[in-house]
Image (cartoon, rainbow, N blue to C red):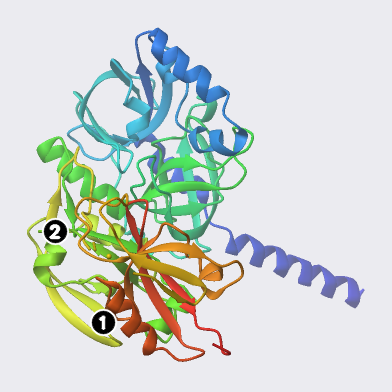
Amino acid sequence: MIIRVTLGLILLAASQIANASLPDFATIVEETSPAVVKIIAQAKAPSPAAREQLEELEQLPDALRRFFQDREPQAPRGGGTGSGFIISKEGYIVTNHHVVAQADEVIVRLSDRREFDATVIGTDQRSDLALLQVDANDLPFLQLGKSSELKVGEWVLAIGSPFGLDYSVTAGIVSAKGRSLPTERGENYVPFIQTDVAINPGNSGGPLFNLQGEVVGVNSQIFTRSGGSIGLSFAIPAKVVKNIIEQLEVNGEVVRGWLGVSIQNVDRTLAESFDLDRPRGALVAQVGKDSPAERAGIESGDIIVEVDGEQIEVSADLPHVIGLIAPGSKVPVSVIREGKERSVRVEIGALEANEVARVVASASEPGTLQALGMVVRELQETDENPSDLRGGVLVTKVDDESAADESGVRAGDILTRFGRTPISRLADMESAIEQIKPGDSVSLRLIRQGSPQFIGIKVPEND
């Protein structure tokens, strides 16, 4: 009898502990769902050219087509649906850009089944956000929370209309933060929140809540092989949403901060060559002419490790931070140059809504030198190279399994820097080679097909 009573008490205690640790999703849903809306985007029938594009998209291999799965493919065919949420009593509504991008008419349906025609105040393709407005009074609305305080492993939940199933609720945890998912144009301004919340087509534009009932993200994309959720969904952080929506409300478009550099990640070999304690920061491969970075004195080969108090751990962090800084702001930027950290003050430039960020290269002239398994010579007028190149040496051959080959150097690359030595002519290369020792790690800056990048090369011990 004592054993049975004790066992019963243990099971009861275990049950109470389990129940106590689970969040109260029901209360959150009850309080927030009235401000969640369904977006009905109505579009004209597609043109023959648009139909042809859709057919081409359907012919893509799964590995490529999956990136477009949550782009509401129904919309261009005459209409589609998505989700959104009200953020003010004035009737402003947030959703995704791709939900309304092709729409000629947008209808908003509330949870009480009232419907309103919506005006598109503005959209931003780079962040995949759109701001709508409806003419209605006394609407419930939601608060944007602090996405920066989210922790990996924290509970979150979503409300939306997946596959047209209105006001469906799903929950899960934050899987990761700061995920970079470059757009088709290679731009990367959103540090996505990754979750395992079940998100499907139709959830796009809907809110992601924390356990305080605050909106910490806007559901935007999924990774899928089947067209449905496999536990890899991505939301735009509330910090980004707030910045974009405020600009759309005031100006109808978005202007981002711009630094004017081409960057890359720092791997282990590059970290050693730049005397870093570990791989970190954004390595500046190129500085744009007359850019904010050039005016501030940032140089090719600098490693940006902090901007305005925000740590830059990987290169993808830099556009996330710079893009949210108001143009004209003067901010401190910490760089590592020649093994020492220094601070420069940069006045951030502006990247207009439809402007594409570009960086213009610089470094040309005539010999041959063989080292580290590669043969280089001076540039000649007959060589194909960027018109504004003012120096460098051309790699004409790379030996198989050599140090250069293993580091990724290729014939046709133009070397413009070896270690800390700028390379304008072959003599510069000869001088730089004389300074290296067996076992050294050396960084090479090169131009490949018009794009600058750094490569780390390990000098063989027996050289």
Residue 262 sits in quarter: bottom left
Q: Is residue 54 left or right of residue 361?
A: right
Q: Is residue 105 left or right of residue 67?
A: left
Mark 1 surroundings within 10 Å by alpha-carbon count, few (fewer than 14), some (14 through 19), many (20 or more): some
Q: Is residue 180 left or right of residue 458?
A: left
| Residue 14 to residue 181: above or below | below
Where residue 115 appears, as percent x and y from the top left, is: 32, 18
Where residue 295 appears, as percent x and y from the top left, is: 9, 66
* Residue positioned 22% across, 54% down in the render: 359
The residue beneath circle 1 is 337
* Residue positioned 54% across, 26% down in the render: 163
Residue 290 visible somewhere in the drawing: yes
Q: Give the SS element for disc 2.
A: loop
| Residue 112 to residue 22: above or below | above
Residue 275 visible somewhere in the drawing: no
* Residue positioned 83% across, 75% down in the render: 6
Quarter in which the C terminus is drawn: bottom right
The residue beneath circle 2 is 289
Furthest-front residue in this view: 367
For residue 369, the mark is none
Kind of residue sitting beneath label 1:
Arg
Q: Give the SS element for disc 1.
A: strand
Mark 2 surroundings within 10 Å by alpha-carbon count, few (fewer than 14), some (14 through 19), many (20 or more): some
Where residue 461 appears, as percent x and y from the top left, is: 56, 89
Kind of residue sitting beneath label 2:
Lys
Q: Earlier in the sequence, mark 1 or mark 2?
A: 2
The front one of 96 and 29 is 96
The residues tagged by marks 1 and 2 sit, at their Cα atoms, a distance apart of: 20 Å
| Residue 116 to residue 189: above or below | above
Where residue 11 appears, as percent x and y from the top left, is: 78, 67
Question: Which marked residue is nearer to the observer: mark 1 or mark 2?
Answer: 2
